[in-house]
Amino acid sequence: MKRRDHIRQLRDAASAARLEFTSLRNTGGHEVFSLDGLRIPVPNHREIAEGTARSILR
């Protein structure tokens, strides 16, 4: 799965649940997002493995 598509899925899920989704930082190998206080790291790769994408979305 492409990284940008995965981030779009996260944003859509957050807006459907009416939760705040923001980017905290983009350094090193991961971009870290905040979902109402929960930190979600997303790898900085063009492609994210399907299993990894499912785990992050859960």
Image (cartoon, grey):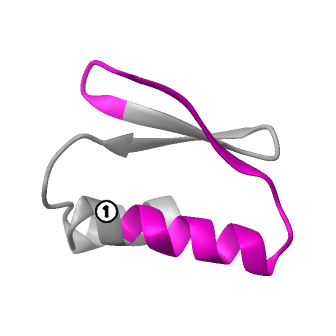
Q: Return the residue at label 1.
A: 4
31, above or below 15, in the image:
above
38, above or below 56, in the image:
above
Q: Quadrant of the N terminus?
A: bottom left
**Residue 30 in picture, x, y percent from top left:** 33, 32
Label 1 Cα neighbours within 10 Å, binned few <14 / some 14-19 / many ≥20: few
Question: Quick check: can you spot residue 58?
Answer: no
**Residue 38 in picture, x, y percent from top left:** 73, 42
8 relative to 36 in the view: left or right: left
46 relative to 3 in the view: left or right: left
14 relative to 58 in the view: left or right: right
Question: Quick check: can you spot residue 42?
Answer: yes
For image coordinates 80% across by 38% down, the residue present is: 37
The magenta stretch spans residue 9: yes
Residue type, mark 1 in image: Arg
Q: In the orientation shown, which residue stands out farthest toward the right?
A: 18
**Residue 15 in picture, x, y percent from top left:** 74, 72
The magenta stretch spans residue 32: no
State the extent of the magenta-drawn residues as a range: 6-30
35 relative to 42 in the view: left or right: right
**Residue 7 in picture, x, y percent from top left:** 43, 61
Q: Quadrant of the C terminus?
A: bottom right
Q: Secondary structure at mark 1?
A: helix
For image coordinates 71% across by 68% down, the residue present is: 14
For image coordinates 82% across by 75% down, the residue present is: 17
